Amino acid sequence: MAFELPSLPYDYDALAPYMSQETLEYHHDKHHQAYVTNGNNFLENSGLEETSLENIIRDSFGKNVGLFNNAAQHYNHTHFWKWMRKSGGGDKVPGRLAKIINSDLGGYEKFRADFLAAGIAQFGSGWVWLAIKNGKLEIMKTKNGENPLVHAANPILGVDVWEHSYYIDYRNARPKYLEVFIDHLINWDYVLEMYEKN
Ligand code: MN3
C-alpha cells in the first residue's frame, strides 16, 4: 500500500511557542513529505507493496537501505506528530502508565532525566524512544531513521533529534528542545494508546 502524508492532528501554530509554525511547515510539509515521496519510489517493485508499514520496516532493514530509511522515517514522523499536543507534557501521565514508569523506570523524575540524557548523548541524527522490550519499558536511542521495531521492541513514545526538528526554534540547543518536548509537548494519552496496543 502506498505511503500517504497524514495531516497534522492540530493547527500549524498549535504548539507555539514551544514548536513554531515555521518548524512544523518545514518538518511536516517538506521533510515528512520527502520520506513519503521517496519511500513510494523505493516501494515500487520491492515485493513488499502489500505488507504493513511495520513489516516493510522490519523486512527492509539491512537489505533495502533506501526503502528502509524512508519507510522508517514515515512511521517515525506519523507517530511523532501524535506524540505531541497543545498544553501537553509534564508529569500528567495517565495513572496506569505512571505506575509502570514507576516500576520499570524508577519514577517520572528518573524517566525525565534519563530520556533527556539519552537525547543529549545521541551523536548526530536520530531518535530517542520509550519502548517495550521483553515486556518492560526501556529508554532507547537509535541513529538516523532506525526505530525500536528493528531492535525487537515496540515504541510507545519517540522524539526526533535530527537538527531539522529544532534548529529553527532552538538553533544548536538540543537539550533545551528536549526539555520543552518533555515538559510542554508530550501527548501522554497517545503514549498510553500505543502502550495498550502491546
Ligand atoms: Mn524529522
Image (cartoon, rainbow, N blue to C red):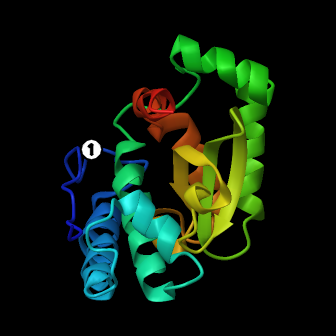
**Residue at point 43% right, 48% down?**
18
Tag 1's secondary structure? loop
Q: Position of residue 69 (x, y in %)?
A: 47, 78
Left or right of 178 on screen, residue 13:
left
163, 32: nearer the viewer: 32
Q: Position of residue 57 (x, y in %)?
A: 46, 67
116, 1: nearer the viewer: 1
Residue corresponding to mark 1: 14
Above or below residue 122? Residue 135 is above
The residue at label 1 has a CB less than 8 Å from ligand 1: no
Type of amino acid under label 1: Ala
Q: Position of residue 162 (x, y in %)?
A: 54, 71
- On the question of residue 46 being in view, the answer is yes
- On the question of residue 166 being in view, the answer is no
Quadrant location, the N terminus? bottom left
Above or below residue 172? Residue 130 is above
Q: Locate residue 82: give its quadrant.
A: top left
Left or right of 92 on screen, residue 130:
right
Left or right of 100 on screen, residue 70:
left
